[in-house]
Image (spheres, helix red, strand yellow):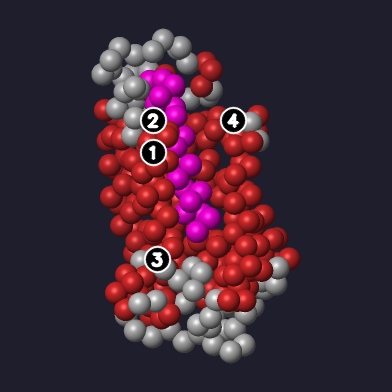
Amino acid sequence: MTSIASRPATAPRPGSQAPAPSGGASALLDGFVVARRNMIKVRRVPELLFGTLISPIMFIVLFRYVFGGAIGGLPPGVSYAEFLIPGIFVQTVVFGATITGSGLAEDMQKGIIDRFRSLPMSRMAVLIGRTTSDLLTNVLVVIIMSVTGLLVGWRINSSFLEAVAGFALLLLFAYAISWVMALVGLLMRSPEAFQQISFLVIFPLTFVGNIFVPSDTLPNVVRIVAEWNPVSTLASSAREFFGNTGGLQPSGSFPVENPVLYTLLWVVILLAVFVPLSTRQFARTTSR
């Protein structure tokens, strides 16, 4: 597929779909074209990025300067800024991954998905393009957050390669969450419905954890949930890679002792389950 504009504009009959080329190379090439379409949309409507970029900056400033002095539980000498910023990274990329579902729900509502389905393109192309473009958006957000974090006292105390590994793990986990959100977006009847459902899931997932406070300061039952929460282990992994653990001494359950391994296991599970489920749902879904 060389360009979307060169394809027939005729929408398919209900339940019909143009024959799709097979092969991973075709899916990647078609997905690149769809990703480019999504990035052009962002460039032409930059307001779409406004909330995504401003929200994490507000969280950093709010917790660093308003709540930071009142939040305890850290060992002496551990900077709250260095504890907080990796956690904010995690919260932001996870929330950023919801753009995938919202974008798909909007395209479904407007009939754009039916237009894509009428083209001789891989069934995975739209999903690959959507998740890839949102991954690129998350890259931009992480860069801006890193600069903001440095301005409020956050520092990377590890090697360059370890820091790169930390950012890579953040983006990899966000990419896996994007496929979860893709399935939810395809199941919802409108972007508004998707936003309500995703908020009810993502908000407690990110707050019942160690993003803002150490998990050992939480009540017993909540602490156990927080320790096994993959968002918590992602935050712990980021702190390790960035050298922000300070005097923190993790001990207890398997996720606490092995945050990187546990997080990678979740990435594999999410991709293995939701990539085929999302692709199957896309193949049998028509616009509302």
- Dot 4 or dot 1: first in sequence order is 4
Position of residue 92 measured from the top left corner of the image (x, y, whole percent): 53, 55
Residue at the outermost right position: 151
Position of residue 148 measured from the top left corner of the image (x, y, whole percent): 69, 61
- Dot 3 or dot 4: first in sequence order is 4
Viewed as shown, does residue 175 lie left or right of 70?
left
- Which contiguous range is marked in magenta? 91-114
Badge 4 crowding class, 10 Å Cα cut-off, few under 14, some 14 to 19, many 20 or more, is few
Q: Residue at x 51, y 21 (%)?
A: 4
Q: Amino acid at mark 2?
A: Ser
Residue hosting label 2: 190
Q: Residue at x 41, y 81 (%)?
A: 216
Residue hosting label 1: 194
- Dot 2 or dot 4: first in sequence order is 4
Check disc 1 and report its element: helix, strand or loop: helix
Q: Amino acid at mark 4?
A: Lys
Q: Amino acid at mark 1?
A: Phe
Up the image or down, 205 lies above or below 37; here it is below
Q: Residue at x 60, y 66 (%)?
A: 63
Q: Nearer the viewer, mark 2 or mark 4?
A: 2
Residue hosting label 3: 208
Up the image or down, 190 lies above or below 265; here it is above
Q: Which mark is drawn over residue 61?
A: none
Residue 132 inside the magenta-drawn segment: no
Position of residue 223 measured from the top left corner of the image (x, y, whole percent): 35, 75
Chief secondary structure of the magenta span?
helix
Badge 2 crowding class, 10 Å Cα cut-off, few under 14, some 14 to 19, many 20 or more, is some
Q: Nearer the viewer, mark 3 or mark 4?
A: 3
Q: Amino acid at mark 3?
A: Val
Up the image or down, 254 lies above or below 200; here it is below
Residue hosting label 4: 41
Residue 113 inside the magenta-drawn segment: yes
